[in-house]
Amino acid sequence: MAFQNVDRAAELESFYTNMDAQNLEGLWRVAHDVLTPEPTTVVQPYLWRWENVARVTHEAGRLVPLERGGERRAVALVNPGLRGKFAATDTLYAAIQLIRPGELAPPHRHTPTAIRFIIQGEGATTTVESEKITMNEGDLILTPNWTWHEHRNEGTEDVLWLDGLDIPLIRSLSSIFFESFPEDSLPLTTATDYSTKAFGSAAVKPVGYKPAAKDGSMLMYRWPGVQRTLESLRNEVGTAHDGMALEYINPHTGGHTLPTMSCWMQMLRPDEHTQAHRHTPSVIYYAFKGNGSTIIDGLRFDWGAGDSFVVPPWRWHEHVNASASEDALLFSMNDGPVMEAFGLLREESYSENGGQQRVTGVFDG
């Protein structure tokens, strides 16, 4: 019997070597790695300090010119678990982009969808297709996939914004296309900020209005309107897991911000501490105002205005406003629409310790 076992082991080894040479594999050998009981990811919870990102971005502004070929001066937030993949999560890319006075970021288009959340500065514009859009702090501007777009700074100060794109997702589908516009700038055939004028109220629109994006996506969401809505809901309960959170919706469909990305603005009121939960979408947060903490799998991430951080998929997390008198505002983007479209959207509430995690450590970078 021992000889039979030795012979079988040798035969199996030869069998597997032969399979490998033919680029074949047996599911029985890898099922425990492929069909896991819960989602696994190499994406790490991580926080980028604004003071570090801003320093590098402004240094890039001094050293790196804007020209065709380079296209954009954007400093990407690279997740330590995804080095070499140019990504913040498995599906999302984020970066801080800078455009200096007098500069033009040349027009181009690409299949990845993009969002711009304006951080600081005045005088810049983004043109999407034929519509010129002014950029102000707190505004959200969309660039739906395969739409021509350019950025221009006609002001006197640097303008910075948070970029969010679904590049990792589109790359994984082998569907990246990119094209430069043949001219130096885009023709303007639509009134400046026409989308804002047309949708001063999301309940009405001009008869005959045709959105620039083929999917009907809104091109911009002005911060004053979002701020007023948040303030009007201040005394409402909100959600147990996210405080008072708003989703930027497509006004034509009532659906998500974009087909592959959803954007939120959430208000954590003074001393507010949410309940922990986990979900399949990954989330990139930008701390727009205030200070607070987010606890991810027991590790506390302390953030202040300008900081960015990532919550990987299926990780326990909760938010805390550290102030007893000031609101904390978090802008975020997530890949929830993709999970929803493929029937992969799941969420689970944390049931231990009154719904809040015990802190086991503090992130120090």
Image: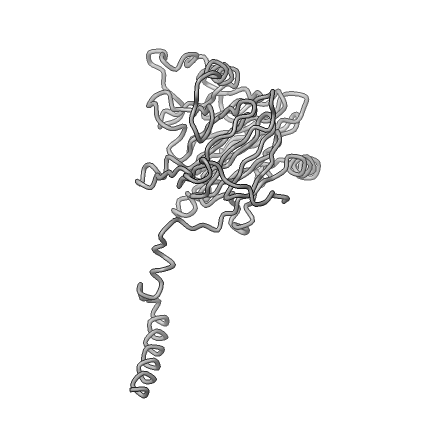
| Residue at far front of view | 353
Relative to the observer, which residue lies in front, 278 or 287? 278
Q: Position of residue 82 (x, y in %)?
A: 52, 50
Left or right for 251, reference 57: left
Within the image, what quadrant is residue 134 found in?
A: top right
Q: In the rendered image, which quarter contains the C terminus?
A: top right
Relative to the observer, which residue lies in front, 255 or 216? 255
Question: Quick check: 10 above or below 110?
Answer: below
Q: What sort of colour scheme is used for the picture?
A: one colour
Q: Position of residue 274 (x, y in %)?
A: 48, 30
Q: Position of residue 329 (x, y in %)?
A: 54, 25
Q: Residue at the location (42% across, 51% down)?
A: 40
Q: Residue at the location (41% across, 14% down)?
A: 199
Question: Quick check: 227 above or below 3?
Answer: above
Relative to the observer, which residue lies in front, 262 or 86? 262
Q: Residue at the location (60% across, 43% down)?
A: 363
Q: Exactly how many numbered labels are in the figure?
A: 0
Q: Position of residue 294 (x, y in %)?
A: 54, 36
Left or right for 267, reference 216: right
Question: Quick check: 331 above or below 112?
Answer: above
